[in-house]
């Protein structure tokens, strides 16, 4: 039926797959492909589902693309014997994904693991990134909380014993904890997200892949100076919307952007790692206003 509104379907979300090498990437897409592009990159333990409310809030004006990273969500990826689960290789896959979709320039909205993927994309293609929104996606040493202590020991000595000490990290109980920790009122957190991600992390072989990624996260910390140099040299418009009670990434990590991008817009919310789960009504309009001010 014709509603008479030529933009009536603009906010419809499409659920698609794109074969990229050996990885079949699931992604959510909305908006007019001729509009400015926004690339949404989720973190652990999440998927593009975490952006379920943000996508339609942007799609009337932007072309919104939200992939599930390899080993997450509904993306179909091979075992570690056939695919290297490193942040550099995941970035290569997402880079090729953007090229196959002909995304020539895009703003990035990043969370957690999605941040180092976004930063690596920026290093590879400095002029493609039009703006940055970080929801608890870190790029500074001072942003690493004490929750990383056991992981740091694994980085320094990747022994079977230190890996075994982290065996509960990719577990349903840990996933649920990451959604609830630091949230003053846990009843505000819908169970859908952590239940879905608990099912995904419980797939055969996935826990081992997640521990491989935890080990490789050390390369992101080692690359922080390179990422920070890109911030300083490029001065991208940057908005940080930060759950201030995050057990992984401290507010100091968000504040540190001011050293490299004096005009960075830094905002804090009384919640945990997944700020959009509890404070989406406050944060999404802030993201929209920021993009409207900087993306044309």
Image (cartoon, rainbow, N blue to C red):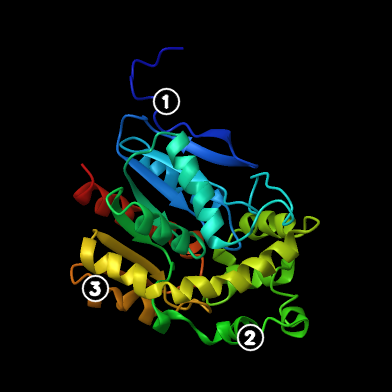
Q: Is residue 124 above or below residue 164?
A: above
Residue 112: x %, y % from top left? 50, 65
Callout 2 crowding tier (Cα within 10 Å): few <14, some 14–19, many ≥20 = few
Say which quarter of the image contains residue 216: bottom right
Give the class, few, some or many, for how many residues have Cα within 10 Å of label 1's Cα (few <14, many ≥20): some
Residue 108 horizontal/vertical position (percent): 37, 52
Please report the residue visible at 33 percent of the width from the left and 19 percent of the height from the top.
6
In percent of width and height, residue 37 lies at 34, 40
- Is disc 2 placed on a helix, strand or loop? helix
Q: Which residue is mark 3?
A: 260
Residue found at the very far right of the displayed protein: 204
User: Element at badge 3?
Assistant: helix
Mark-to-mark CA distance, 1 and 3: 40 Å
- Residue corresponding to mark 2: 150
Mark carried by residue 9: 1
Q: Residue 270 vs residue 157: left or right?
A: left
Q: CA distance from mark 2 to mark 1?
A: 48 Å
């Amino acid at each position: 039926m014709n509603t008479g509104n030529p933009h009536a379907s603009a906010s419809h979300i499409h659920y698609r797959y794109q074969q990229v090498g050996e990885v079949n990437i699931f992604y959510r897409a909305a908006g007019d492909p001729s509009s400015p592009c926004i690339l949404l990159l989720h973190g652990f333990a999440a998927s593009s589902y975490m952006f379920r409310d943000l996508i339609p809030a942007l799609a009337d004006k932007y072309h919104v693309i939200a992939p599930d990273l390899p080993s997450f969500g509904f993306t179909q990826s091979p075992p570690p014997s056939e695919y290297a689960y490193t942040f550099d290789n995941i970035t290569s896959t997402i880079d090729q994904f953007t090229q196959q979709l002909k995304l020539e320039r895009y703003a990035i909205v990043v969370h957690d693991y999605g941040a180092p993927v976004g930063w690596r994309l920026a290093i590879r293609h400095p002029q493609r990134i039009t703006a940055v929104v970080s929801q608890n996606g870190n790029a500074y040493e001072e942003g690493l909380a004490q929750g990383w202590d056991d992981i740091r020991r694994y980085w320094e000595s990747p022994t079977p014993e230190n890996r075994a000490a982290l065996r509960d990290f990719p577990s349903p109980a840990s996933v649920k904890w990451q959604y609830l920790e630091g949230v003053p009122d846990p009843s505000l957190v819908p169970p859908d997200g952590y239940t879905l991600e608990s099912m995904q992390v419980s797939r055969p072989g996935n826990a081992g892949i997640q521990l491989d990624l935890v080990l490789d996260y050390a390369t992101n910390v080692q690359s922080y100076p390179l990422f920070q140099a890109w911030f300083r040299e490029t001065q991208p418009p940057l908005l940080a919307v930060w759950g201030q009670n995050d057990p992984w990434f401290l507010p100091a990590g968000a504040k540190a952007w001011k050293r490299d991008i004096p005009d960075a817009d830094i905002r804090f919310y009384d919640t945990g790692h997944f700020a959009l789960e509890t404070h989406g009504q406050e944060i999404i309009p802030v993201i929209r206003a920021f993009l409207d001010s900087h993306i044309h």
